[in-house]
Amino acid sequence: MTSGAVPPGTGPLLSPIGSVGLPLASLLTIAASLFVGFANAETLGQYGVLSLALVAVGVSLVWVASWPRLGHHLVPEKYLRPALGLPFVCCILGAVWFRGGLYGKGSALSISIALVTAAAIAALVFTVFRLSDAALASTVLLIGGACIAMVIASPAPRIDVWGMFQAVARGLMHGHNLYTQRWSPHLPGQATIYAYFPGAAVVLTAFYALFGDVRVGLVLALLASAILVRWISTNPNAAVFGSLFLLYPLLTFSVEQSWSEPLSLLVLLLLAWAVRSQRMGWAVAALAVLLTFQQYDLVFVPLTAAWSEFGIRRTAISVGLASACIAPWALAAPHSFIEGTIMYNLQYRFAYQSLSVFHLLSGVSSAMGYLVLIVSVAVALVVAMKRLYRGGSFLMECGLVLMTLDFVDKVSRFNEWELAAGLVLAAGSEALGSSQVDKAQLRDRPPSSDGVAALGRQDG
């Protein structure tokens, strides 16, 4: 998976951090994830003037970072410690400022907050001393403990997603159809019907059976995703991106809420890793599993079809497998299936809470909101598909499309932004390992022609 085309007559050269430099695209993805993360945490994924301004900057940075040539522009080695240390300082500030646990209480909540802060401090120290794998290992252990402590602190959060997954997991264990079950919501107006494709519930039922709480499965998915963020890159220093992912502001809050996006992120990373490792059968299976989770995961189908390393044929096979898995549930209760997976989402009215510009545009004209949504996503898809066809980064283009969708969508809450930020960080990790540098070009180029490249030459 390359980040752009290689000039004729040159070959790809790995550019490990500390020898040639760090791709500018990688630093931009870190900055984008921080802007989005702080915006998301500032109002818990709901509309706010400051939060909307911050995500606008984050989305803009992703568009810049996705420009193929930026994978070749290097920040020199002497700037790397502050460039990588500053994000962890921000993570420490976020851990202190945003203290997760909307419904949590007691000593377990205090332990969770303390572990998040400790994880951010430890990651900063290890990163400054160039111990990237140690930074990731400490973050996985401490954030894993913080997430479990959050589950203990909030045993019954008053949110429909948790109640939905718990209820359908109990029903599945007794042989009931997902879409014909009903349960008592925690609050008036919350969902009383299963609103996703069946895959996420089937996966999480195993963790409900073992631990009594589906959130344990989501915690493991987050930790596994952080490890994969490191392993999708050929550079061991990419571990810092996995640490930054787990230090996303209020990540323990997302665990408390039981949102299933960690499953989608994990499978997307598995897909990218499988393709890079030439395990195409695993890649086809990963996409098929992804398409059984949530409806908006379908936005990635055009990208896999255009991806030169995956292609239309494998995408069609994955879509067929996913359809075969979903069909029995749909055919067993067609009316309930349509009500849950289509009508519920179309009729969802909480656009004013969404961290997007949709509500602002629809305030002027309802047609304008939908027009901007359709045009923006269409443009992002066309740009991303064109780059993927030419050998671009799958993860970067997924992040670009999802960030754009979140910015203009009717309902973009904390969980959708968290998934987009995870994809962008993974793309930054990938760019670190797959950056292609024409050393001859760097050597022959005069210093005045390209400051960044010249600095890379001097430090390399």
Image: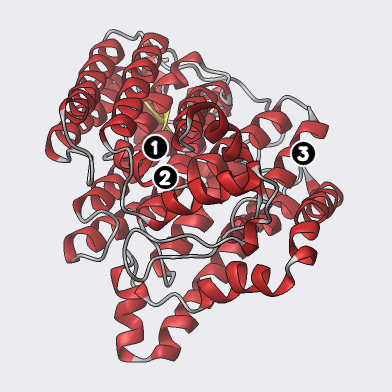
Instruction: First in sequence, mark 2 or 3: give its number.
Output: 2
Q: Is residue 437 left or right of residue 316?
A: left
Image location of residue 349, percent across then percent down: 39, 77
Give the amino acid type for the residue marked by disc 3 in the picture. Ala
The C terminus: image quadrant:
top left
Q: Give the Cα distance between marks 1 and 2.
A: 48 Å
Q: Residues within 10 Å of mark 1 (few under 14, many from 20)?
A: few
Q: Are marks 1 and 2 in contact (CB under 8 Å)?
A: no
Instruction: First in sequence, mark 1 or 2: give its number.
Output: 2
The image shows residue 110, relative to residue 135, as above or below, that is below
| Callout 1 secondary element | loop
The N terminus: image quadrant:
top right
Give the amino acid type for the residue marked by disc 2 in the picture. Ser
| Callout 3 secondary element | helix
Observer-nearest residue: 32 or 47?
47
Residue bearing mark 1? 450
Q: Look at 59% across and 55% down and name the residue there.
A: 294
Q: Residues within 10 Å of mark 2 (few under 14, many from 20)?
A: many
Residue bearing mark 3? 285
Q: Look at 66% across and 44% down and name the residue there.
A: 174
Q: Residues within 10 Å of mark 3 (few under 14, many from 20)?
A: many
